Image (cartoon, rainbow, N blue to C red):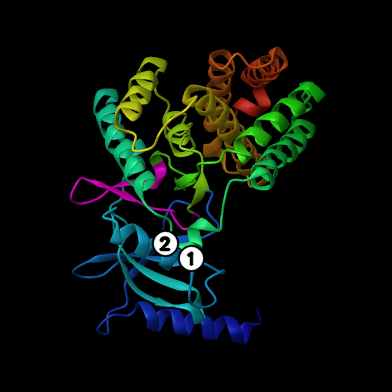
Amino acid sequence: MSSESTDSFASELQKFITINGEYPKVTPMQKEASVRRYFHLQYKDCTKVMCLDASFLALPYDFIEVQKFYKENSITVPEILDSDNSIHCILLSDEGKNDLSSIEDDNVYLQRLKEAIDIICTLQKLKPIDLIKKKTFDYKKLATEGYHTINAYAKFQEAYKLEVAVTVELFYLFEEITTSLGSYENKIICHRDFHSRNLMLNPQQTLTVIDFQDTMMGTPAYDLASLLYDAYRPISPSAREELYSYYLDNSPVELVNFREIYLRQALQRSFKALGTYLKLFHQQKMEKYRKSIINALENLLEITQLGCFADQCYVFFYQLNKSLLEDIEFLEPED
């Protein structure tokens, strides 16, 4: 972008967020894995959130269409106050500073997770709009997620000189799991990234769902596995089983062989998440994801045991976890 274009963009953006002659205090919000950038706008009498998304080029736009779908079906999402695709900008309601992961009391957190599961159940009852229906966790999509982690690990492995390698047996296990999940017939609506950091504690102290724009079709276990094996805010195995039972008691869909599907999906989802944490930590130098790597590996160890997956799968995660916990270079933050 030329200097002239940059100046023009900045000028238009300033006009867009100036309300009744008042220009707000603009503060960047904590950067997460999303490609979108969010900013907190402090006006004299109110606060708002600005989202900048380079993919927002024209209407219809996925974020706006899916927001409307959620809202029409009584799922709380941020209000869209204004938008301008010429500057890739959306103005949103401020849904609070804290997300679900900020709750420190385990008992309180457990109860709020039941509210989150209620949202999953609401989503799973809905008939998808065409935008959602045409996107699905098929073999190709799931395989792409697997390769994402394998590639991220290869770069991480080289940097830290790790001897733990992805074996042929491990590769074929994930190939088989990807095939079975991709061919699941009765797919339902999935948020796709349903974890504690995407559930805001709004001013009314209920949950506001964010990062919903990539909602798509998948197994009934996808969002549940994302939530119960959330590496941002770990829970105990007993709490996980309690919440799993809560979902079974409230699920709006017919569940056949669900335990097997759930554990396969949990393995696939946590493996994909591991790749994201590795990339953000190593390639993008985001230190806060160090702990998420260890939490994800501990989740994967539990899942491989519960699902009685191949020994090579457990050995890989065990050896990698052990190597990292003994690696001073990994454990110590960079200066």
**Residue at (61% x, 19% y) in the render:** 325
Q: Which residues are magenta?
A: 197-214
User: Does the CB distance between marks 1 and 2 fall below 8 Å?
Assistant: yes
Query: Horizontally, is 311 left or right of 134 in the view?
Result: right
Bin the neighbour count of mark 1 within 10 Å (Cα to Cα): few under 14, some 14-19, many 20 and up: some
The quarter of the picture where the C terminus appears is top right
**Would residue 246 be counted in the magenta stretch?**
no
Q: Is residue 209 magenta?
A: yes
- The x, y position of residue 169, in whole percent, is 78, 21
Disc number placed over residue 115 in the picture, else none:
none
Q: Residue 213: percent from the left, percent from the top?
A: 47, 58
Viewer-closest of 50 and 325: 50
Q: Name which residue type carries label 2.
A: Val
Q: Is residue 78 above or below residue 83?
A: above
Q: Amino acid at mark 1?
A: Asp
* Circle on res. 62: 1
* Residue 334 visible here: no
Residue 288 visible in the displayed image: yes
> Residue at the location (54% across, 49% down)?
33
Identify the image quadrant of the N terminus.
bottom right
Q: Which mark is residue 66?
A: 2
Q: Nearer the viewer, residue 265 or 99?
A: 265
Where residue 112 sits, quadrant-wise, is top left
Looking at the image, residue 73 sits to the left or right of residue 228; the answer is left
Q: Position of residue 268 (x, y in %)?
A: 60, 32
The answer to which quarter of the image holds residue 71 is bottom left
